[in-house]
Image (tube, grey):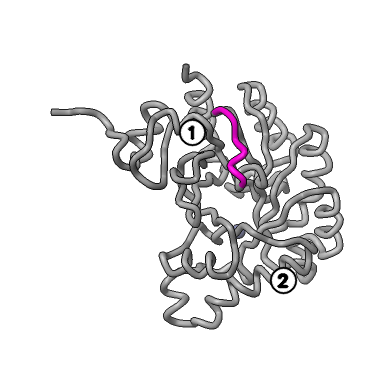
Amino acid sequence: MNQGPSLERPLSFVESVGINGIAPSGRQGFAPSDLSDRVLVLCWHTFLGAPDINTDLSLAKFGAQLDTIKALGYRFITIDRVLAGDISGRMNIAVTIDDGHRTVPRAIERVLVPRGIVPTLFVYPAVLGTTDFSMSDTVLAQLVATGIPVGAHGYHHLYVNEALFRSQPEVFMKEIYKSKARAEGLSGRFVLVYAYPYGSYSPRTEDEVEKAGFAAAFAVKPGFVYANPGLNDTFALPRLVVTHDNWADILQLLQRNAALP
Ligand SMILES: [Zn+2]
């Protein structure tokens, strides 16, 4: 007999999002009403306007995506509010931008600031200020001074998983501990949230990130972050990377979530 998805266990993406746009990722045993306060966390990367790079957008397209999200009725909330569980209703989006690319400051200035949106920047110190790829330390500090939060994203942007721990345990630890210390040095703020490079992690990674003093970490997987912390996997929170290929799917999810009664 097909009884449909049960709320006694986390739902798979297909059975939950496909049906009603809700995908709890954390603990079991909760009332459906607990699901009502939630945020979708989205991740962008670079803004070169290179159509052949799946994670790259022109500033015009980035702005158009944000305007589409806003037109559906969503409000943009900061990562600080997400971590504090200060989330009201289902129409919330948090903007994150990974890797500290050199095009990010211009995207903030021209696209995000005019729309009143505060992103979170996940940076990895190995490239910051040392390569043409990334923004400089100084520019990052200037952005932080305007109130933009910074999160850790590894030190060298490695796969921080069990294979790395087994082959190079000291490198594994550096990706967690030194990334935190350096990001804090660069930003002058406590860095409390980690985003796993490539979305790669293991149970050991989650444990070590927690031990290092992070309050939460983002994986790359579908689902909402809920105001009720009991519904979240705190060290493997869901987040979706925006690409050319998946934008239509993300938009459909946003539309379904918006259309719920
Ligand atoms: Zn990255």
The residues colored magenta run 84-89
For the residue with label 1, is its CB less than 8 Å from the closest atom of ligand 1?
Answer: no
Residue located 53% across and 44% down the image: 240
Residue labelled with disc 1: 249
Kindly give the residue lying farthest to the left in the view shown: 1
The image shows residue 192 at horizontal and vertical percentages of 64, 59
Instruction: Indicate which disc residue 76 carries.
Output: none
**Chief secondary structure of the magenta span?**
loop
Residue located 47% across and 16% down the image: 261
Calculate the distance from the C-alpha at mark 2 to the C-alpha at mark 1.
36 Å
The image shows residue 175 at horizontal and vertical percentages of 59, 72
Q: Is residue 99 visible?
A: yes
Q: Is residue 85 magenta?
A: yes
Amino acid under disc 2: Arg
The number of callouts visible is 2
Q: Would you say 101 lies left or right of 93 here?
A: right
Residue labelled with disc 2: 182
Q: Secondary structure beneath disc 2?
A: helix
Q: Is residue 9 magenta?
A: no
Amino acid under disc 1: Asp
Label 2 crowding class (10 Å Cα cut-off): few <14, some 14-19, many 20+? Answer: some
Label 1 crowding class (10 Å Cα cut-off): few <14, some 14-19, many 20+? Answer: few
Looking at the rendering, the quadrant in which ligand 1 lies is bottom right
